Amino acid sequence: MTARRILSGMRSTNPRLHIGNYEGALRNWVELQNEGYEMFCMVADYHALTTMYEDAKEIAKNNLEVAKDFVAGGIDPEKAAIFIQSHVPEHAELHLLFSMITPLGWLERVPTYKEKQDDMGTAEREPYGLLGYPVLQTADILLYKPYGVPVGRDQAPHLEIGNDIGQRFNRLYGQDVFPVFKYMIPQDENRAKLPGLDMRKMSKSYDNCIYLSDTEDETAKKIKSAYTTPSKIKMTDPGIPEGCAVCQYLKLYSPNWEAQWQEDRDGLRGCSANKKECTEAVNEYLRPIRQRRAELDDATITEILRDGAERARAVASATLAEVKAAMGWN
Ligand code: TRP
């Protein structure tokens, strides 16, 4: 284990990250970076392919945009290695080797597999790669022998399989190649579970997201039509802030949210005042991220990714060499 090393990744299924991705993952990465961890931040394009193989070209475009959001969100390319999974071929090779030692039963039990299977519709559309998803994720992680992996709670089953595969490898080949890594799951539920503008889970498919790269006007328009207390028609009607999307954002981003919630409850303020203050708070919060993003062009991010892949490969190829040596294949 490398005491100060962290690896994490996000799939490039969307061209841009939303504020929920930021609160649930990216923000955590930035904090770890600022605490001095050596970060490996990966855009998981192979993983995107498991559900989007018909749109391979789109994934390639998304890769650049997601990487821009990493940098805009505060990942410093001087400190962290930012890279695209498919630029580091060791991920594919270690995935293959791990696929040989992973019992099928471990994979069939994974809850996210069952969910994604349902999403694909029919068995004919469902690729082999979907079942192997956690095996590829294990290769992503163990190539870097990290101290920890920061992810959302939904990823915990994948990380468990990751440590199981690593320890199984060690046992099978009689060498301690892979240390056990830690799961770093955000403790702040308000941030980790920031709802969409309609109070459902924030997701592109629900069209309820605030994107890091939205303009301030787009953000204002979205918040204007956000879900509030349905029974609050007039200002004097009592609101129920716990069930109101605008109030969830106020709670995170407005310093005087407690007073705002109380007035909402007491019928002393209307939803439009809440929405206006919410818009200001969210836009202020995202302003530095948006400014950094506007300054990033394709050439700059391409160079960052080239450098990141080089740094990642240096570590990944050394681990792969150890793996082969343990197997007696050197
Ligand atoms: N499966 C992760 C997700 O959907 C993305 C991912 C791929 C990842 N490889 C990883 C996360 C390695 C952490 C470590 O969010």
Image (spheres, rainbow, N blue to C red):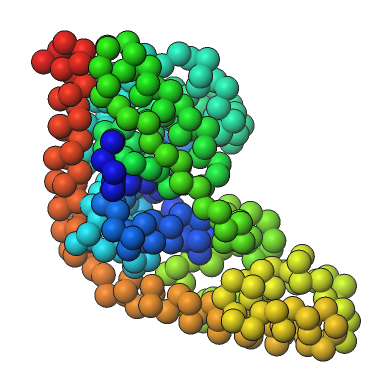
Identity of the residue furthest to the front in this view: 3
Residue 154, position in %: x, y? 55, 41
Compared with residue 260, is residue 49 higher up or lower down, i.e. above or below?
Answer: above
Residue 175, position in %: x, y? 25, 17
Identity of the residue furthest to the left in this view: 330
Compared with residue 232, is residue 212 higher up or lower down, i.e. above or below?
Answer: above
Left or right of 250 on screen, residue 19? left
Left or right of 257 on screen, residue 67? left
Residue 230, position in %: x, y? 83, 70
Residue plotted at (63% across, 76% down): 250
Question: 88 and 118: which one is in front?
Answer: 88
Residue 134, position in %: x, y? 44, 30
Does residue 158 appear in the picture of this structure?
A: yes
Left or right of 202 on screen, residue 173? left
Residue plotted at (85% across, 84% down): 267
Residue plotted at (45% across, 13% down): 103
Does residue 132 appear in the picture of this structure?
A: no
Question: 177 and 152: which one is in front?
Answer: 177
